[in-house]
Amino acid sequence: EYSMRNLILIGLAAFFLMMAATVSVMWWTRSLAVKKQAEAMIESINTYLKDKDSSFTYESISVSGFPSTMNVTMVKPHFTGRMDKLLADPKIKESLGIKVLPEWAEDVTLDGKIVAGVDALSNKFKLEVFGEWLTKGNIAGKTIETISQVDGVNACELQLKGASEIFNDLWSFYILVDTKKDSLKNFSSLNCIISSGKSINTSTKEALTSFGGGQLYISRAPKNDISDMRFYLIFKDLEVSKAYDDLMAVYMQALNQAGNFPAKSNVFFIRNRVGRL
């Protein structure tokens, strides 16, 4: 009886050890594939941007979260581009009501990181943005530099119903775009938390905008043949300063010089605000 008990314990220990080793191998294999896919996607984007004098770079990409989650972290993403060339497609210009674009370049850097994560069952996804946005725009020979500072983290969490197929869809981002999985049908909830913060004109140190934070929440609960959808949206204390009006006026003036928009279109960009600093 004693020997049998030992054999059972040894057998159980061997089984759990084998499962742990299997999960470890699967996670590391999947993490390497996910990192390569992310790098390949960015390479594909840069192929498209190349002939438009634009590019997207980053400091590093890493994968972490073993064993329960898989988090892909991109450090200091940086976009630099000629907006006049990116928007030069006739269909884009027509949809935006643009006739002629002045020379227009934008340089945007996140002095922080972006984290995209998925849990082991591939039914909970997250997107988090940490850090400050640094922008430098040059339109029609005029340069504008701003910094957007946040007090916390901007984060979204997507919850799907059901679970993945064991050993098939574990830690899978692809399940979101796999038409066979029908992610929309399995949608359960989306919760986005927007951190409070402010934006500043880097050159003049003037405050441009101030924001008290916000939240977007959408949930779906199936009931027989229909679904009960709930939508919640709140923004707190959004204020826009005259300095922001002046900044947007620079862009609008440059675009209007080519007769792109009627004069009244400035109302949305310059006068549409909740408060004033």
Image (cartoon, helix red, strand yellow):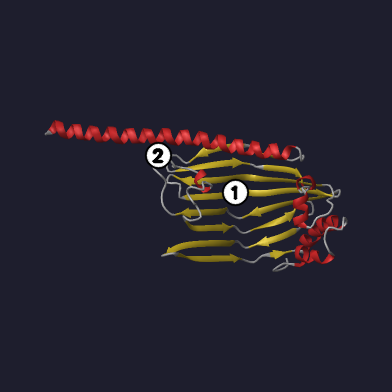
Q: Which numbered marker is on residue 143?
A: none
Dot 2: element: loop
Q: Residue at x 78, y 61 (%)?
A: 243
Q: Is residue 53 above or below residue 91?
A: above
The residue singled out by tag 1 in the image is: 130
Q: CA distance from mark 2 to mark 1?
A: 32 Å
Circles 2 and 1 in contact, beta carbons < 8 Å: no
Q: Residue at x 74, y 59 (%)?
A: 208
- The percent coordinates of residue 160 (x first, y second) are 46, 53
Quarter containing the C terminus: bottom right
Instruction: Please name whichever residue, 29 or 128, is drawn nearer the observer in this view of the structure.
Output: 29
Q: Which numbered marker is on residue 167?
A: 2
- The percent coordinates of residue 199 (x first, y second) are 70, 56
Instruction: Please name whichever residue, 130 or 191, is drawn nearer the observer in this view of the structure.
Output: 191
Label 1 neighbour load within 10 Å: few <14, some 14-19, many 20+: some
Disc 2 residue type?
Phe
Instruction: Please name whichever residue, 135 or 20, is drawn nearer the observer in this view of the structure.
Output: 20
- The percent coordinates of residue 247 (x first, y second) are 79, 57
Instruction: Please name whichever residue, 126 or 164, is drawn nearer the observer in this view of the structure.
Output: 164
Label 2 neighbour load within 10 Å: few <14, some 14-19, many 20+: few
Dot 1: element: strand
In the image, taking residue 276 as reference, residue 120 lies left or right, namely: left
- The percent coordinates of residue 54 (x first, y second) are 74, 40
Q: Is residue 176 visible?
A: yes
Q: Earlier in the sequence, mark 2 or mark 1?
A: 1
Image quadrant of residue 154? bottom right
Foreground label between 2 and 1: 2
Image label count = 2
